[in-house]
Image (spheres, rainbow, N blue to C red):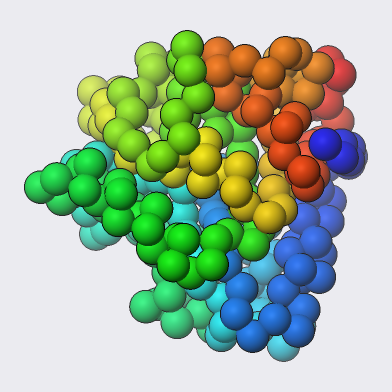
Amino acid sequence: MEIRVFETMQEASVAGAEIIAAAMQGRAHFVLGLATGSTPVPLYRELARRNAAGELDFSGTHSYNLDEYVGLDGSHSQSFRYFMDDNLFHHINIDPANTHVPSGTGADHAADARAYDAAIEAEGGIDLQVLGVGNNGHIGFNEPDSVFHAPTHIVDLTDSTIDANSRFFERREDVPRQAITLGMGGIMRARKVLLFAFGAVKADAVRAMVRGEVDPRCPASILQLHGDTTVLLDKAAASKL
């Protein structure tokens, strides 16, 4: 892992946008893995700014999101499809047909998960994957467990994840209890990973990810085994390293 620490999340997000822009430079076809939540919002604003300024072209980009809540369709204001449209896709020149989010509303979740992995493979794999990290060390919705799950799969969300995400819903009871998520295999096959973490609330997870043993109880720790991961932190998130 390359660890880079910045004064602010805005500085880290600008640095991340520069890395993405460099990776996309001159590529007629680029596969970008994307994440949701509050962490990547400054990054997406910077990418949209660069696109509007003519500095970054998404016309050849195909995007694949990490995850989606089970039971929420794309019109729901808390679905990850809605989030991506609102925070990035509607502000850049990406073809909507080339934006992909796992389906959490199909009749056969296992078949949908297999189809999502197959679609990424048919695309040639993910060139660059954007990640955040949860307070409990999850990446995507790969929660702490006794094993690492390789394929895209359905996961039961932990109480800590439900608590963390309840701020986006009217009531805690409204937070879905399951999600469909890209598995560790899909994440680890990405040719490059950019992981962002901001705030003191992430400091313990960052330490476990970077300094701890590779352990499925801290899913993000598997990135120690990835060949090209850059971790971009603000000072608060890096405070326990």
What percent of the width, then of the height, locates residue 214? 68, 18
The image shows residue 216 at horizontal and vertical percentages of 55, 18
Near-viewer residue (120 or 16): 120
Residue 119 in sight from this viewpoint: yes
**126 displayed left or right of 177:** right
Q: Quadrant of the C terminus?
A: top right
The residue depicted at 48 percent of the width and 69 percent of the height is 123
Residue at x-position 55% and y-position 61%:
125
Tell me what residue is drawn at x 69 percent, y 48 percent: 193
Q: Position of residue 53 (x, y in %)?
A: 73, 84
How many numbered marks does the figure carry? 0
- Relative to 145, 30 lies left or right: right
Q: Is residue 212 above or below residue 82?
A: above
- Residue 170 can be seen, yes or no: no
Report the front residue among 6 and 115: 115
Is 70 rendered above or below residue 53? above
Q: Is residue 102 above or below residue 55?
A: above
Q: Tell me what residue is drawn at x 43 percent, y 75 percent.
A: 98
- In this rendered view, identify the residue nearer to me: 110 or 76: 110
* Residue 213 x %, y %: 72, 13
The N terminus, quarter of image: top right
The image quarter containing residue 149 is top left
